[in-house]
Image (tube, grey):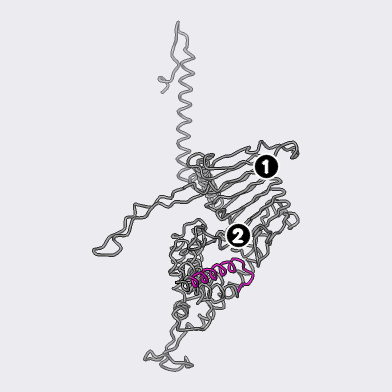
Amino acid sequence: MAATNAPQKGVAGRIDYDSWEKRTSDLTKQLEDEEEAERKESASVLGLDGRHARSKAEAEEQAKAKEAEEMKKMLDSYQKREVAVIAQLESLLGPVNHEAVTKEEKDQETKYVTRDMLDAGKRVVSISNSSGPGKIVLTQDLSNLASFTPANTSLEPKTYRDDAENELPMPQDTTHRGIIKLILQNLHNCTVVIKCKVITGTVEISHCKDITVMISGDDATVPTIQSDLCTNLDIQFHDAPSGKNVPLRVRDTNSGPTTTLFWGQDKDDRIYHAGVSRLHVSTYRDGFVDLETRADYKENGAQSIGNSTAEEIQFITSVVENELVTERIYRPGEAANVKKGMMPLTERELKNMQEQKKKIDDAVDKHLNNTIKITNSDGAEVKHANVQEDGIIEEVYTTTREDIATIVASCENEKAKGNEAFTAGEYAQAVLFYTMALDRAAELPDATTVEERLSGKSTIPITQLFPRHIILSNRSACFLKLGHHEKALKDGTESELLDPTYVKGIFRKGLASHAMGRYREAIDSLATAHKLEPKNKQIKQALQFAEVRMHQETQKRMES
């Protein structure tokens, strides 16, 4: 080694120091590389290379970091897709001017948003950064925009010899008409009129000041509005349909479908708002104010809680017992009974949920108390027997409280999926989910009692472990949308049998009878519903339609 590493003589017998320094540097780097490789190998063996957590806390941190990274990737992907479908319409009435503009200084103008203003494939409309005075109208022309959901043609149905269903057509693409969603941002001193169909039924409003939003006409279905950080926001519904509206086409006329369910007449018609000052909400019928209310996040008691500011506290305005009411909503973690994964609930809804849970618990207890039967050695049931006697055998049914809770939770899950599909206009898919909920409910211990009630073997009122009448009513609404009126009538009839006080089931039974031209039956059902809810204008209007058609049919028969 000494001979090899000795410094070499250079020119004229002098030592070549440059060569010596290079050789020394190379040896030093080689030594450092070897030490680093040994360190990495030792760290890997000891689990200190960062790929394996050294403690439970570090493992949790790594899991959180990985989850955050995956979430960021998903959000980035979603944002890219969203940008591809958003039509950005800015400064339609002119750029935002923070100085006051009077009507004398600027003429009122109206901008009409039509199909030719949107690029191909862009179905989410964003109107932003504009200042009035003036009016922006989303015309009914936008309802003619078409969006397609491709059918899953890879699932070719299996065929059987001589089977009747072999000739069924393959699934077809689904066509949705209208804009997908409307976003209003940073608008000042103007009016926005929505006359077109919004497929998702959602309008988002944020950072707006002194604006009026008018939802008007049979096409303008906007059940959900989310408004944040706005001042002087006026929201008006002019004969606007509910998200659960089932249009009723009057026979023998050229008129279009008639709205039968107006905004606010379904519990899912809601306005969510946070940080909104001086909010005014009103509904109009035939040009006159029907309901109205005012709200302000400070006056409604919003306060900072922990890291959340008062502007982040959410409220909801909806129709409760024919009155517009503003309530604070609680998200998972904000209230003891709002669990992770649940929808936000108001205090009133929390109370109702507790009452419903108590009813179910009482019904479960009633069923579980009857899950023990006593038989003798021959297998015959012995009533009021002493279990200590010889020859007596005790049998315990296998359904437990935990089993029932699991089945009910599964039913609720399918119901939620069905509601979501219905809101999105996927009525056939909603039928599937509602049917799955009913199939799962058939596994509950009260299934026999329910079947006896539906078959007419029993007329005794029953308490269900899961509200099947609501599912049947919802499925009836889907069948009405799909034009399957006989199926809608059957579900509405069974809904009424299970709960004769459930108005929606009776109402949809009446609508189905009307659609089938059975006006006498429709009048009977709608009259029953009207008796249960005499203030419900939707039921009253449908009843009047049925009476008019009944009168016309009677006149025709008399003339012939």
Is 542 a magenta residue? yes
Q: Disc 1 designates what residue?
A: 134
Tell me the kind of residue under disc 2.
Answer: Trp
Q: Quadrant of residue 167?
A: bottom left
Of helix, strand and loop, which mostly describes the magenta segment? helix
The quarter of the picture where the C terminus appears is bottom left
Name the outermost residue toward the left: 161
Residue 307 appears in the figure: no
- Magenta residues? 532-555
Label 2 and label 1: CA atoms lie apart by 26 Å
Percent x, y of residue 297:
72, 54
Picture residue at 46% right of the left edge, 48% below the top:
147
The quarter of the picture where the N terminus appears is top left
Mark 2: give few (<14), some (14-19) or many (20+) Cα within 10 Å: many
Mark 1: give few (<14), some (14-19) or many (20+) Cα within 10 Å: many
Most foreground residue, 147 or 498: 147
Q: Is residue 11 above or below residue 130?
A: above
Percent x, y of residue 358:
59, 74
In the structure shown, which secondary structural element does the residue marked by tag 2 occupy? loop
Q: Is residue 279 above or below residue 207?
A: below
Percent x, y of residue 512:
48, 68
Most foreground residue, 407 or 382: 407
Q: Is residue 393 above or below residue 15?
A: below
Percent x, y of residue 306:
70, 53
Q: Disc 2 designates what residue?
A: 263
In the structure shown, which secondary structural element does the residue marked by tag 1 occupy? loop
Foreground tag (2 vs 1): 1
Name the outermost residue toward the front: 559
